[in-house]
Image (cartoon, rainbow, N blue to C red):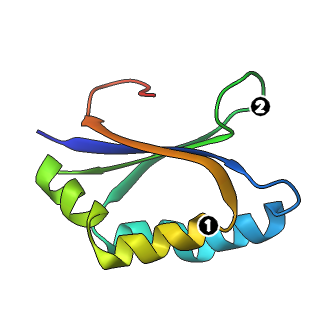
Amino acid sequence: MTAKLIMTWDIVPEREREYFEFVIREFLPGVQKLGLELTDAWATVYGEQPQIQVGAVSDTLGEVNKVLTSAEWDELKDKLMEYVINYHQKVVNLRKGFQF
């Protein structure tokens, strides 16, 4: 069954410019290079939810777990953490519609 990695976070105040440069140039391409297919990205404009949500899928739970336990993922995530706070991730079975 297809598995989905759901990541949420808030951008560190006053680091927005550097954050967006990193995400576009390194993070999103890095996630794809590791074998996950980006499916959605959301920004919260109103309410008490995480500011950003990104989803990525792979064919199996095992493939997602392989990515999440790799040194490459650790390096990519460590770089992301320079620009974000309140980071959370979870892996779920993919289903139709919005998943949070």
Locate residue 47, reporting x and y percent: 75, 21
Name the residue rendered at 36%, 40% in the picture.
Answer: 90
Residues 5 and 79: in front is 79
Please, what is the three-letter code of the amino acid marked with disc 2? Answer: Val
- Relative height, residue 57 to residue 50 (above, below): below
The reply, left or right, for residue 23 in relation to residue 90 is right
Element class at badge 2? loop
Q: CA distance from mark 1 to mark 2?
A: 19 Å
Mark sitting on residue 23? 1
Q: Residue furthest right?
A: 14
Q: Earlier in the sequence, mark 1 or mark 2?
A: 1
Asked if 58 appears above or below 73 in the picture, the reply is: above
Where, quadrant-wise, is the N terminus in this rendering?
A: top left
Left or right, 42 with respect to 97, comes to: right
Q: Position of residue 34 (x, y in %)?
A: 31, 72
The percent position of residue 9, horizontal first and vertical second, equals: 61, 46
Residue drawn at 64 percent across, 35 percent down: 50
Q: Residues within 10 Å of mark 2 (few under 14, many from 20)?
A: few
Q: Measured along the vertical axis of the image, is residue 83 above or below residue 60?
A: below
Residue at 27%, 35% (x, y): give it. 92
Mark 1 element type: helix
Q: Residue at x 38, y 24 (%)?
A: 97
Depth check: give the residue in front, 12 or 2.
Answer: 12
Q: Characterize the local packing of mark 1: few (<14), some (14-19) or many (20 or more) Cα atoms within 10 angstroms.
A: some
Q: Which residue is mark 2?
A: 45
Q: Quadrant of residue 91?
A: top left
The image quarter containing residue 84 is bottom right
Q: Amino acid at mark 1?
A: Val
| Residue 6: quadrant of the picture | top left
Q: Where's residue 69, x and y in %?
A: 26, 65
